[in-house]
Image (tube, helix red, strand yellow):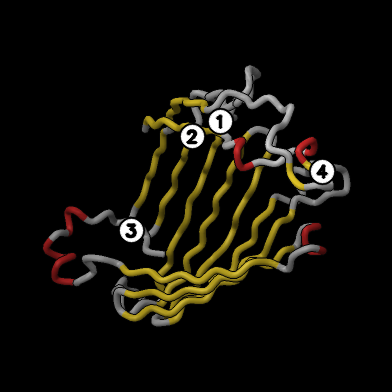
Amino acid sequence: HFYSSSRNIDFARLVFNDQLSLSGTNPASIEVPPMKKVRYSDVATSLLVYTQNYFAGFVMDHMMKPNESLKDGVSEIPVKYTLHGGYKHYLNGHTSQYNEESIFAAFQYRSQGKYDQMELGAYYTRLPLILGFWYRGLPFVKSYKPGYANNDALIVNAGYQLKDVKIGYSFDITISRLIANTWGSHEVSLIYEFNQNQKLRTKKKKDIVPCPRI
């Protein structure tokens, strides 16, 4: 798809070193503001292949490598590549949305410029409970500095589904060198799925994408 963006800096909200004094803040600075706003257009494309149990996709973003520099220099946004896929296995032999027991495994790989990241994980579902465990990093393949392992986080997920409503909790456990400053982050989600009535889904079966439900 095609999209456009704009960026700018509000210099009125910044305070520079030459504005600080014992008597307070001086209103003027010798710093020269860059251009007020930069606008650019960009293009992204994607491909998705799916069945009832499998899915795989590819995304290419920032294909035009736009220049987002606020000065007269060049600061191109590198092309971003994303590859993802997954498989869902139903343990109870059927795919009823309210009486499901399944294992769902998936991955996502992202690359932009010199940076890469991989996410691997799985969910175990036995409704109404959903449990998940994920790993984020790319060890043994690429390190940005000698002795610096490309590890980021372990993610633990738990959720509860009540018909069309899902309540989820996620905790990212930091395993990189940032662990000295932060133990991780918490996330709580509330999801409501529309048009999940079984009669309605059967009636409009042609309009429903048969992609695995997470």
Q: Earlier in the sequence, mark 3 or mark 2?
A: 3
Task: Single out the mark in the foreground, 1 or 4.
Answer: 4
Q: Earlier in the sequence, mark 4 or mark 2?
A: 4
Q: Which residue is mark 1?
A: 79
Task: Single out the mark in the foreground, 4 or 2.
Answer: 4
Q: Earlier in the sequence, mark 1 or mark 4?
A: 4
Q: Secondary structure at mark 3?
A: loop
Residue located at (47% from left, 73% from top): 168
- Give neighbour class at mark 4: few <14, some 14-19, many 20+ (Cα, 10 Å): few
Q: Which residue is mark 2?
A: 60
Quadrant of image for the C terminus: bottom left
User: CA–CA distance between discs 1 and 4?
Assistant: 44 Å
Q: Residue furthest front?
A: 23
Q: Is residue 166 left or right of residue 106?
A: left
Q: Secondary structure at mark 4?
A: strand
Q: Which residue is mark 3?
A: 52
Q: Amino acid at mark 2?
A: Met
